[in-house]
Image (cartoon, grey):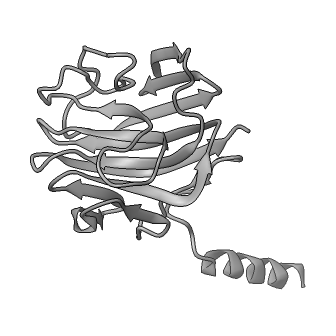
Amino acid sequence: MKYGAGLLMLGALLAAPTPVVQAEEGWIVLFDGKSLDGWKANERPENWTVEDGAIVGRGKRSHLFYLKRKFKDFEFKAEVMINPGGNSGMYFRAQWGPGWPKGYEAQVNNTHRDPRKTGSLYGFVDVRKQLVKDNQWFTQHVTVRGNHIVIRVNGQVVVDFVDPKHTYREGYIALQQHDPGSVVRYRKILVKPLD
């Protein structure tokens, strides 16, 4: 009897669908690895696709917003890969609308001509050193509490900044497609609310 019940339980577990990304406790999965459910481009939606379990941005400027909810204090992380000369960014506390979003941006740029490299808090703190190689996956992790912002690249703290103006207090998460020469990939996109 016990043996048969165990087989039934095992069969039920094997039949259950397995999510592409499983989050640790407290983390919310923003991208299921298969679709753009919950995401919307502010312009040029055709520039965003899903390929091999990643969100891919190509073409002219476009920002892909996660519009299911706004965030105030949180952790936000993703695995990212960008091509040589590519430029992108992970926006947070961003406002929905056309053009360049109003919000904070954690820069993604290894070899683009812009001197602000991956890990920079764009317009606030510049990282001038190339930290990661093109065409390789890396993790960028942002922690925001009030006006205190910390950015980590592959676990290393590269920005630890207190914004005296508390410029942006709440908003959406968004991904940037910067220009026609850039091809960026995002996967394992997670957020952990802290408020």
Q: Say which of 69 and 98 sits in front.
A: 98
**151 horizontally vs 112: left or right:** right
| Of 178 and 9, the residue lying toward us | 178
x and y percent of residue 83 in the render?
16, 42
| Image quadrant containing the C terminus | top right
Vertical placement of residue 14 versus 77, above or below: below
Q: Residue at x 68, y 81 (%)?
A: 11
Q: Quadrant of residue 78?
A: top left
- What x and y, as percent, mark residue 103? 44, 37
Q: Going by the image, does 91 lie left or right of 134?
A: right
Name, please, the residue furthest toward the right.
1
The residue under the point 36% across, 56% down is: 64
Q: Is residue 85 above or below residue 27?
A: above
Residue under the point 41% across and 35% down: 139
Q: Nearer the viewer, residue 144 or 14?
A: 144
Position of residue 87 measured from the top left corner of the image (x, y, whole percent) = 21, 38
Front in this rendered view, residue 6 or 169: 169
Question: As displayed, is residue 45 above or below residue 120?
Answer: below
| Residue 144 occupies quadrant | top right
Q: Position of residue 81 (x, y in %)?
A: 28, 43
Residue at left offset 32%, top offset 16%: 126
